Each structure stands twice: as structure tokens, then as C-alpha cells.
């Protein structure tokens, strides 16, 4: 039921005349108020006189004022629509900003009003209902009437917001000098992240010296929360990385891919001490490739460090077993951005791109590379898989005593007590990766409770797969390097070994591309031109001992065989002898051609002699010869004097 509206809780004697059994004469009402000590006050804003509070009136008068305001105010003077409509948004907006404790208070008040309505519906009067609810809740009658007044004229659906307490709260401004606040902020907002207590103590010493006004330490805590935003505090005290974690991460939907459409790769170092074949004890590094559509780990290789050969071999395992992917998401580390792997990509953001650089393996097989941010798990989902492997592999019972912990302060009690052989580690790793792919109950959106194997198999069966040819297999099984062939015989040297084939003689003193297997350097290598065209397979020329006669004989035999083949090829090229060539030349004597006519005269410039100096009986050539003889004679005389 709706409670009518009353304009005020204070009424004059004239307004109360005849209400709820009160006398009709205002003078009699004033006399009754004096006898019963009603709560009173001077009339405000409407001339002289006194007013009486509704809580002091008899119960019958209170009930009449609450439910029959028309006895006091004419209907034309009341506005019943404005509070119900105009204030709804304001009421609920204010309610939404309240803490949960204040909302609980509003719910208890609403329950009290509902109880009053239930009692009245059962036949009780308003006064009896209010008395009963007051005894039940422990609230005063005046307090319950105030709740009724708050809900008066408001729609029943908005009572909860209207009954919520409205506290003014603490004052917004606290007395603190601007210089003191600046000093405190500069001290608190530092990467060293000092505590508030220490900053406040230093502030007190500075305030005593400068005469600043500072509040209490508890107030300083409150000012930090109110005036300095949490992201700002995080940036100043914890750094940019911590601030970046506050910003919500992007959620990427991998269901847009099908199997083998996109892969990502990264390296992970396990926290296990292993003994390698050369006796070295070091933690193993795994390079793994993962399918983005399903999350399945497709291939991996293990070595002591992450390098381009490890990435290349793992990529070769991926292509050999599953096929060539369409795209790869990689970070631009030194290994992935190596020219051996991604040379020829439009952007590598690593190293200086040179025209003579070879085209990378991943580029040659037609895989588009997308560069991601290093150490960023959202860009590479394989980071999530590594977290599982840390639990299932690094802490495997077979590696008890070899586990070293994931941080210097997280070492187990049996730290460094043993080192497992690397072959044993590889066996456990293979088993756990297979179990990781087959484990059901995956919560990813594409898995829906299935395993990575099941998701991959379902998509893999419906898409065409690009397979590698024999020529492409040589690309990832061998590494590329630009070398210059010898200017003498065309042989190439690589890692201390020398390689040669007959086709290399044509490329003497030229830069070529050599692809080889670093694990088998004594086997043959494949040579290519700089544009990728194959030259041929060059065998390794083994270095023999100085007194190894057997190796010398084999080398001489091979050289003779090669020279015989070259002579046979030369004989095949020369179809006629020199005498046959001479016979086919035209006969007859050919006279020598006359000397050409001279048309250029060399000019000589010298002082013109006078008439007495000109020669008379001798020619010009004779005069020149005599001058040379005289000069030579003077030179001989000077030499004798010296």
C-alpha cells in the first residue's frame, strides 16, 4: 500500500485542531501541549508562534497525520508525481555508491515497513503495528516513523533506495600544507617503495623544521588512497611491468585457425641438472613447436643452449611428421631472427640485412612469419604449456635430487645431490609431452573438455596438408652459409674442412651458398648459387698425415682419374686437329699494309735565337747533337771534380 505524503514533522496548534481526537480550539491544543510537555519549537519562516513535533502527539493524532494529510493540506497544494518520477534515478544512483553495510541497513528498514503492512492487513492499527515492530527490531517509535516518512510518496519498488542511510562522510579537504604534501608524495612515490610509516616520520621532522601543518599518520594513509590513484602508485613504486599487468590482457580466439595453419615456437630451460656426453653438467634447453589451433606440442629438440641449429632441427621434425605450416608466430630473438631461418622476410628487426644474405629455411618453404613480443605469454600460448611441463617434467620423481628450483631462493633440500644422464631426461620428456597432448579435460574454448590430441586430429583430417619435397628436406636438415670458393680450384672451406666437386671449378673466386649438417661435418655438403640454384654435392676432402702413403696413393689415383676425364671431355670438344684447321685456311701471300700517313705534328716551343746564334754551315740536327755532346762533357768534368 502507498503511504501519503506529509510536508513536515512540525505542526502548529491551528493545523492540529480537530485531528485525531484533538480539541478543535487552538487555545485548548496549546493548553494540552503544555500539560503533556509536547516537543516544541518556534515557527520558522511563517511569523510568530510555536510548532509541535509529530512524535509528541497522541497516537491517534500521529496515525491521522500519517494517513490523512488531506486534513491539513488541500489537494491543490500537494505534488505527488514529482518525487515518484523525478528522483528515481537519483535515488538508485546514490544507492549504487553505498557500501554493502549501508545496503544491509536499508534492507532491515524495508523489512520493518513490510512487517507494519502485514500487521495492518491483519487488522492492527498503525500505532499498534509500529509498537510491535519497535519491540521486535529494537528501534524507537520515532525512528520507525522517520522511516515511514522517508518512504512517503515514493513508489513501493523504490523504497529500498529511499530507506538507505545518507551519511555526509568525512570532509574532503584535510589541513595539510602544500609543501608538506609535495614532500611526502616525492618520498613515497619512489622505486624503492618505502613504507608510509617511514615517510611520515621523515615528514614530521621536516614539518617541525619548517612549521608545516600535517595530519595524523592514519589520515595520511587515507589521503594516499583518495588522492593518488592505484595505477599511478603502481607505476611509481613497482615499475612499468607491474603497471602493464594491471591493464586487462587481450583475449585472443584461436578457433579462427585450423590444424597446422599457424604454429608458434619458443625455448624453455628446465630446472634439472643433466650430465651431457662430454661430462658437462648443465640444465637442458628445449625448443618446441606448438599448433595454435589445438594447443598440441608438435615437435621439440633438446640441447644445452638455444641456437639456430636447434630451431632448424625442431622445425625439420615438424615438417617431416606433420607438414608445412602456413604461418609462424615467433619472437625476434637472435635464434629465430637468424638469416639461416628467416632470412628474406620483409622485416626481421634483427641484424643488418645485406643483399648477399641467403634466403632462410622458413622463408623458402613459404611460411609467413609474424613477430611477437618476447616474454609475453598472451602473444605465444606455448608459454602456458611450459608451465605444465615445469610441474610434470622438472619435478618428476625420476629427477629427485637433480631438481634445482625455479629461483635462487627456491632450492630444495637435496639441491645438487645428483645429475641425471641426458638420455634419461629425453625419455621422460618424451613420455610427459605425449601425456600432455593426450590429457583430457582441457578448459580452452576450442577443446571443450577434450584433449589436445583429439582437437588436432579432428581438424587435421579435414584440411589439406602441404608436404615437403626431397629438395626442401635438404633446406632444414642443412644450414646455409655464404662462403667464397678458392680462386685456384674452386674448393670451399668450412669449419676447418675442405669440400670440392667438379662443378665448383666454374665458381672459382665467387661467393656461393653451402648447406651442411653441423653434426656431420665430414659428410658431403650441398652447394648453391646465391639466387638458390643448386650447383652440386661437394665431398669432404679428408686431411691425411704427412707420411700416410696409402692416402697419398688414393689421392693421386683420384687426381689421375679426374684429369683423364677432363682430357676425354677436351677431346670431345675438339673435333679437328690444328693441321686440319690450317688446311681450311685460304692460300696466297698477303702483302703487308703500307704505313699510315702522318697527320699530327708535334710542336716544340723554345726561345728564338738571334741572327748571330743561328747555325750557318751545319744543319739543325748537327747543332742539336753538338749541344748534347757539350752538355755530356760538362757532366763528366763535374763528376771528376767531386
Image (cartoon, helix red, strand yellow):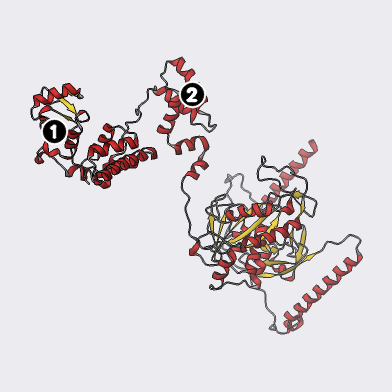
Mark 1: secondary structure: loop
Q: Outermost residue toward the left? A: 25
Depicted 234 relative to depicted 472: above or below: above
User: Is 8 or 58 nearer to us in this picture?
Assistant: 58
Judge left or right: residue 2 versus residue 395: left
Residue 188 appears at what percent x and percent y?
Answer: 49, 29
In-front residue for pair 304/35: 35
Q: Is residue 48 left or right of residue 333?
A: left
Which image quarter: residue 17? top left
Residue 571 point in image, percent of width and height: 76, 80
Dot 2 alpha-carbon crowd within 10 angstroms: few under 14, some 14 to 19, many 20 or more = many
Q: Which mark is residue 335?
A: none
Residue 359 visible? The answer is no
CA distance for labels 1 and 2: 66 Å
Could you say which is closer to the camera, residue 344 or residue 224? 224
Disc 2: which residue: 200
- Contact? badges 1 and 2 (CB < 8 Å): no
Q: Can you give x and y, in whole percent of width and height, for residue 307 in the image?
A: 67, 54
Q: Which residue is mark 1?
A: 21
Q: Residue at x 43, y 30 (%)?
A: 222
On the image, the x and y values in percent for residue 272 come to 71, 50
Amino acid at each position: 500500500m502507498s503511504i501519503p505524503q506529509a510536508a513536515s514533522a512540525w505542526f502548529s496548534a491551528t493545523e492540529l485542531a480537530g485531528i485525531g481526537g484533538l480539541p478543535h480550539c487552538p487555545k485548548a491544543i496549546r493548553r494540552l501541549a503544555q500539560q503533556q510537555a509536547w516537543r516544541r519549537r518556534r515557527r520558522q519562516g511563517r511569523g510568530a508562534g510555536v510548532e509541535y513535533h509529530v512524535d509528541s502527539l497522541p497516537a491517534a493524532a500521529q496515525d491521522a497525520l500519517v494517513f490523512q494529510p488531506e486534513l491539513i493540506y488541500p489537494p491543490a497544494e500537494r505534488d505527488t508525481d514529482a518525487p515518484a518520477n523525478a528522483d528515481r534515478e537519483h535515488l538508485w544512483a546514490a544507492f549504487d555508491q553505498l557500501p554493502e553495510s549501508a545496503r544491509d541497513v536499508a534492507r532491515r528498514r524495508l523489512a520493518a515497513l513490510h512487517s507494519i503492512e502485514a500487521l495492518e492487513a491483519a487488522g492492527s492499527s498503525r500505532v499498534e503495528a509500529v509498537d510491535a515492530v519497535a519491540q521486535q527490531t529494537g528501534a524507537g517509535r520515532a525512528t520507525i516513523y522517520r522511516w515511514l516518512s522517508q518512504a512517503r510518496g515514493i513508489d513501493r519498488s523504490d523504497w529500498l533506495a529511499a530507506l538507505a542511510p545518507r551519511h555526509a562522510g568525512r570532509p574532503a579537504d584535510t589541513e595539510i600544507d602544500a609543501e608538506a604534501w609535495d614532500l611526502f608524495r616525492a618520498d613515497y612515490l619512489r622505486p624503492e617503495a618505502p613504507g608510509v610509516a617511514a615517510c611520515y616520520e621523515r615528514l614530521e621532522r621536516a614539518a617541525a623544521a619548517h612549521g608545516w601543518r600535517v595530519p595524523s599518520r592514519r589520515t595520511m594513509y587515507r589521503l594516499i588512497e583518495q588522492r593518488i590513484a592505484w595505477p599511478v602508485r603502481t607505476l611509481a613504486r613497482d615499475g612499468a611491468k607491474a603497471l602493464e599487468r594491471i591493464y586487462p590482457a587481450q583475449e585472443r580466439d584461436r578457433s579462427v585457425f585450423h590444424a597446422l595453419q599457424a604454429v608458434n615456437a619458443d625455448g624453455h630451460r628446465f630446472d634439472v641438472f643433466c650430465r651431457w656426453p662430454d661430462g658437462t653438467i648443465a640444465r637442458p634447453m628445449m625448443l618446441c613447436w606448438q599448433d595454435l589451433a589445438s594447443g598440441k606440442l608438435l615437435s621439440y629438440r633438446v640441447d644445452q643452449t638455444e641456437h639456430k641449429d636447434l630451431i632448424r632441427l625442431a622445425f625439420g621434425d615438424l615438417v617431416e611428421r606433420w607438414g608445412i605450416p602456413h604461418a609462424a608466430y615467433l619472437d625476434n630473438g637472435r635464434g629465430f631472427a637468424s638469416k639461416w631461418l628467416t632470412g628474406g622476410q620483409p622485416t626481421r628487426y634483427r641484424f643488418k640485412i645485406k643483399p648477399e644474405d641467403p634466403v632462410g629455411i622458413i622463408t623458402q618453404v613459404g611460411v609467413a612469419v609474424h613477430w611477437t613480443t618476447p616474454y609475453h605469454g598472451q602473444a605465444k600460448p606455448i608459454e602456458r604449456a611450459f608451465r605444465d611441463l615445469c610441474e610434470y617434467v622438472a619435478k618428476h620423481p625420476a629427477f629427485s635430487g637433480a631438481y634445482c628450483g625455479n629461483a635462487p631462493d627456491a632450492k630444495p633440500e637435496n639441491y645438487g645431490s645428483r645429475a641425471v644422464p641426458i638420455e634419461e631426461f629425453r625419455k621422460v620428456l618424451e613420455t610427459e609431452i605425449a601425456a600432455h597432448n593426450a590429457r583430457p579435460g582441457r578448459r580452452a574454448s576450442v577443446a571443450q573438455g577434450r584433449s589436445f590430441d583429439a582437437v588436432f586430429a579432428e581438424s587435421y583430417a579435414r584440411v589439406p596438408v602441404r608436404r615437403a619435397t626431397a629438395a626442401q628436406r635438404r633446406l632444414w636438415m642443412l644450414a646455409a652459409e655464404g662462403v667464397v670458393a678458392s680462386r685456384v680450384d674452386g674448393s670451399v672451406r668450412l669449419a676447418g674442412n675442405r669440400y670440392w666437386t667438379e662443378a665448383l671449378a666454374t665458381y672459382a673466386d665467387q661467393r656461393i651458398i653451402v648447406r651442411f649438417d653441423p653434426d656431420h661435418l665430414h659428410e658431403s655438403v650441398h652447394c648453391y648459387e646465391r639466387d638458390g640454384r643448386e650447383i652440386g654435392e661437394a665431398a669432404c676432402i679428408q686431411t691425411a698425415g704427412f707420411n700416410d702413403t696409402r692416402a697419398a696413393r688414393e689421392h693421386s689415383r683420384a687426381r689421375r682419374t679426374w684429369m683423364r676425364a677432363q682430357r676425354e671431355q677436351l677431346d670431345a670438344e675438339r673435333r679437328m686437329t690444328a693441321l686440319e684447321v690450317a688446311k681450311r685456311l685460304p692460300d696466297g701471300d698477303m702483302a703487308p699494309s703500307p704505313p699510315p700517313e702522318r697527320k699530327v705534328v708535334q710542336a716544340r716551343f723554345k726561345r728564338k735565337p738571334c741572327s748571330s746564334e743561328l747555325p750557318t754551315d751545319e744543319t739543325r740536327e748537327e747543332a742539336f747533337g753538338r749541344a748534347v755532346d757539350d752538355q755530356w762533357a760538362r757532366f763528366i768534368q763535374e763528376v771528376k771534380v767531386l
